[in-house]
Image: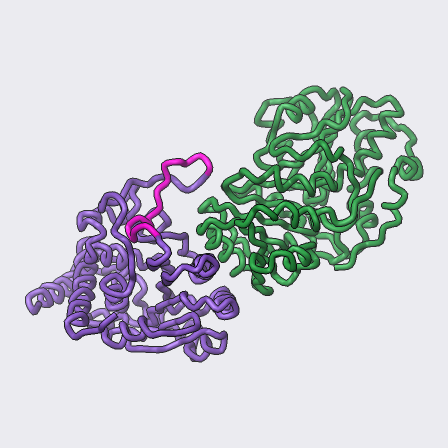
Chain colours: A purple, B green
Amino acid sequence: MVITPELIEDLENFAERIRNRVFAHVLKNNGGYLSQALSAGEIFAALYGAVLKLGPIEGSSLPTKFPGTPGPHNQAYISGARFNGAPSAERDRFLFSPAHYALVLYTALIEAGRLDPAALDQFNADGGTMEMIGAEHSPGVETTTGSLAQALSQASGIALARQMRGETGRTWVFMSDGEFQEGQTYEALQFAAYHRLAKLRAVVDANGQQCDGAMDDVMSIEPVVERVRAFGCEAVAVDGHDMAQLVAALEQPTKKPLIVIARTNPTHTLPLLAERSPVLHYLRFGSTAERERYQAVYDQQLVSV
Amino acid sequence: MELVSRPHLDNFINWCANRPEVLVLSADLTNSCEVGPWRDTYPDRFITAGMAEQNMLSVAGGLAREGFVPFIHTFAVFIYRRAYDQLAMSVAYPNLKVRLVGFLPGIVTPGGVTHQAIEDIAIMRATPNMTVVETGDATEVVSVLDAIEHVEGPVYVRMLRGEMPRLFDANEPMQLGQSRLLSEGDDVTVITAGITTEEALRATVALQAQGVGITHVHVSTHKPFGDPILDDAIRRTRHGVITMENHLITGGLGSAVAEYIATAGIGTQLVRLGLCDTYAHGASKAYLMKYYRLDAVALTQAVEQLLDRSFGISEQDLEAVRLDAVHSAAKAEAL
């Protein structure tokens, strides 16, 4: 990929659109997973705007109704993977690990033209597939991953199968930094390194936040870059809000599984949210007055754009 | 009775010759699960996962999504105890064609509590999309591969290894969802699975010699549960049903029969033999079967209680029924 200034500018605008759309949605719904969009906007913009080599979406750009869970008696089941296009030997695959980033993923799909903007009205609605915590039937989701750390292992299985068949496409995972507290993550790194899964790549939104608050006050994962390297994978840390750095890191050649640690700020572009530190995982407005302060910031931002 | 040594070992190799989609995943128990020669025969299809079962279960899900059929081979406890969340979310929920071959069921191992799978059937039965089968002799160990081949979702196989009897004719393979009718009589119905069937056979032979009418059914499919042979066996008994299982009496065969009886509205008494709300410990299989009342003596006493009669059958009588002198001399397996 040729990384031009024009591409970077396009991707930066892509990231801003993700953040604005999520912000608007959170205001409308009186709360939501906002900090994840602030920290991961550039990551999703880079992935869906440039890095992922995906086929065109299969079928309608509108989400289906809840198709039931997979099983021997459910012939009508449809996976959310169709929004990422049909798999092929040359194309990339994308696994979405921290399923509570669903709103950010859906928004990225909308900005990438893969999901109808009207779909967001069905977010967290009964009987739909736009679930608050993405499920296998949710747009853009291919595997069940909300139980954290399982995606990297699943992706390792997929990447190993593709390697055995000599496929050239890459298998990507979007991860959160909290998953590096789970032992399974290190089992997966160990496995991927041992089996030389050179086409396995993960990008981590290292926003330093988890449900209880700042990760350093819950359970530190540092030095995470050195940890990943010690397990035999390639690791690099970049500024997750510096689009040029981020894209370059994601596209760097490597002979080992690659883990890109994107250092991000959970209140990026919205300093007001920092008032709620250290608990930023889920935003629920405490009062009408608080909501109005956020609305004012939103209105101001749109004017400045 | 014929004794067979390690029937899975060569059979599985031969079975896979024309099945390139089959992979074996192992977590450092390759020879212990009789797939060492399989690895040497098909090195490109053998995936070593190391002692990291959680990752292995999720990797199996990924491989299955790509069209491979992973056969996990490890001790049962490490499949359903150590890696249950991965089993449920990465394999069972998406209904993937993964074979979970679990060794050391119940108290067959001197390895003690850490190695003894005593609640596996309960947990696997409670797992949506999971098919659950158990092998009871060499014929079933060999034929289970064909029996489950066309199940497009995950299957848990409670597997035997090492030396084992051939209870069932080699020409009568395991059939998914089909029990085996081993004897018929109207006084008592005995339902067994796995290694308890051999024990029960000794008791039923002795009891039948005393004129007790016994219907004995061997179950190899725990889920889906129930078939016409079982239904008839449960309905025909005059005095009640006895289940005997190498497992806790909660959640396994005894519970499945209880659910069946209650759901079908059949009014009959049920006696469940098996581990009663207890863990076991490390000792020989013969000792543990006696200690935990999983042997022919326990079954004979249960029949006597149901019928409120005493037949004066001694432990020596039951030993005499034993058809396999070689087997009784078999040493407890090492790990």
- Residue at point 38% right, 60% down? A97
Asked whether, in this view, residue B210 is left or right of residue B36, the answer is right
Q: How many marks?
A: 0
Q: Is residue A8 visible?
A: yes
Nearest to the observer: residue B150 or residue A116 = B150
- Residue at point 32% right, 68% down? A279
Q: Is residue A77 rendered magenta in the image?
A: yes
User: What is the quadrant of residue B238 in the picture?
Assistant: top right
Q: Can you say which quadrant of the picture contains the C terminus of chain A? A: bottom left
Q: Give, as a single range, the part of the protein colored magenta.
A: A72-87
Q: Can you say which quadrant of the picture contains the N terminus of chain A? A: bottom left
Q: In this view, does B311 lie above or below A151?
A: above
Q: In this view, does B241 lie above or below A276?
A: above
Q: Can residue B271 be seen in this view?
A: no
Whole-percent x, y for residue B70 in the image: 54, 51
Q: Is residue A14 above or below residue B244?
A: below
**Predominant secondary structure, magenta span:** loop
Whole-percent x, y for residue A44 in the image: 26, 64
Q: Is residue B69 rendered magenta in the image?
A: no
- Residue at point 59% right, 33% down? B225
Whole-percent x, y for residue A67 in the image: 34, 39
Whole-percent x, y for residue A265 in the image: 27, 73
User: What is the quadrant of residue A181 in the picture?
Assistant: bottom left
User: What is the quadrant of residue B168 in the picture?
Assistant: top right
Nearest to the observer: residue A49 or residue B95 = A49
